[in-house]
Image (cartoon, rainbow, N blue to C red):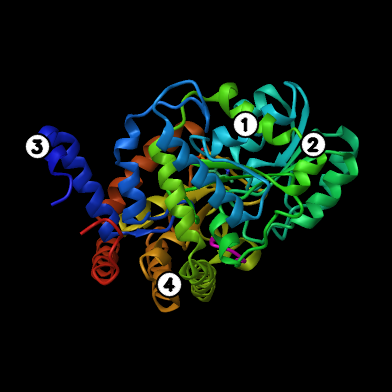
Amino acid sequence: MKYQNIQRQDPEIYGFLQQESVRQKDGLELIPSENYTSPAVMEAMGSILTNKYSEGYAKRRYYGGNEFIDDIEMLAIARAKKLFGVAHANVQPYSGSPANLAVYMATCQPGDVVLGLNLPDGGHLTHGWKVSATGVFYKTFGYHVKDDGRVDFDELRQLARQHKPKLIWCGATAYVYQIEYEQFAEIADEVGAFLAADIAHVAGLIVAGAHPTPAHYAHIITTTTHKTLRGPRGGMIMVTDKGAQKDPLLAERIDKAIFPGLQGGPHDHQTAAIAIALQEAAAEGFKDYGRQIVKNAQALAESLAKHGLKLVSGGTENHLLLLDLVPLLGPGGGVFAQEALEAAGMTTNKNTIPKDPASPFYPSGVRLGSPALTTRGFKEAEMRQVGDWIARALEQIKSYRLPEKKEERAAYINKFKVEIKNNLRLKEIRGEIKDLCKNFPVPGIE
Ligand SMILES: Cc1ncc(COP(=O)(O)O)c(C=O)c1O
């Protein structure tokens, strides 16, 4: 039996763990940034390595007893460098956000100009959005996507020429095309800016050969390790050969920005788990996994389109899709879709769409992704079935509209939640999903 020590010692936490296990097992995980790690990765995360302190870097620690921790970290670094074809890797960032903040620290002074994709257009908070530390401490300008959902490179070029940024971010949190690294590099090189590629979402696709690599175009690459890469929660920063040529001290600056700049001791259990995940990602089978993620996302897109649902850009070139719900639910309908899909056993997240007529808190879209279901073994046929379920669930809520008056929204949404909880059609879908899930186990859950 799993977690028996927790069960004995802390029944409350044990109870929640059990409930979460059932939720993960019986439902469909469609959040594009989530995945299921292997049992080996999970073992490392729960290992005795969590007991150690090791501020500093291998062979240069501020604490004793780091002989084996050094070996683990050096192995993780060697695997990262080989897998991504880069000159330098730092595997200590606690997660993606601190990794990105460290890039600012390494390349800019507070107040310097930075360009990143606007958040409602698909960019991440840490690419300079106003409420993020990155938008508070640096002078950030957001570039946008055009009507077809692609980055507006004319606007980006004009912003770069006008503001002479120190740093330009490419990469996104909700972008359905392959990232156009070459075009970004052309603009960054013209104005002498560092180009940082945030591949958090597509790292696994890159190593599988299902998405292009930024290694020849960007100076710096950041990633989370827990999305398509299928590792533990964590982050990495890499310096490419091009980055090392532009600034021979860049690797050192990145390392100093992480420690002592932003963080204290690295999470050694996480480092070991990252090393294991990198080994898994280098294995031949991972290529099939990465390619299947894309095929599955495309099968889901086709199924949704067949049901008359509108997708931003009409489809996807990677692992995620964005449903534009304006035709079905009007502006700000993402919240209804997320809740109804959840009631039907499908976990998604409401998200802005390009030129969203509502707001980031009440966005008009829903983001869907295939990485987690692909890990469970779903293929195109099952993804088409998921598309049918999504269409059936959304059909149940098409009469709901977000009230225009802000003060009426909370009460309306609460009433909506009660109504969908009792919706028999949604319960029926939930049952069908549970039945299918029995044939597709979640790694780590019996
Ligand atoms: C593109 C991108 N970068 C960075 C991050 C931040 O990662 P974390 O949540 O691990 O801080 C995310 C998370 O969603 C992301 O999508």
Q: Which residue is mark 2?
A: 247
Q: Nearer the viewer, residue 9 or 257?
A: 257
Q: Nearer the viewer, mark 3 or mark 1?
A: 1
Asked whether the viewer can see residue 233, the reply is no
The three-letter amino acid code for the residue at tag 3 is Arg
**CB of mark 4 near ligand 1 (< 8 Å):** no
Mark 4 or mark 1, which is nearer the start of the sequence?
A: 1
In the picture, measured across the screen, residue 19 lies left or right of residue 309, that is left
How far is the residue under mark 4 from the one under mark 2?
Answer: 46 Å
Q: Identify the secondary structure beneath mark 3.
A: helix
In the picture, measured across the screen, residue 253 lies left or right of residue 427, that is right
Q: Identify the secondary structure beneath mark 4.
A: helix
Could you tell me which residue is drawn at 90 percent across and 35 percent down? Answer: 162
Q: Nearer the viewer, mark 1 or mark 4?
A: 1
What is the span of residues highlighted in magenta in the rendered image?
A: 316-320
How far across and how far down the image is residue 103, in percent? 66, 34
Mark 1 or mark 3, which is nearer the start of the sequence?
A: 3
Q: In the image, is residue 317 part of the stretch drawn in magenta? A: yes
Quadrant for ligand 1? Answer: top right
Q: Which residue is mark 1?
A: 255
Mark 1 or mark 2, which is nearer the start of the sequence?
A: 2
Q: Which residue is mark 3?
A: 8
Question: What is the magenta segment's predominant secondary structure?
Answer: loop
How far is the residue under mark 2 from the one under mark 3?
Answer: 55 Å
Q: Which residue is mark 4?
A: 383
Asked whether the viewer can see residue 127, the reply is yes
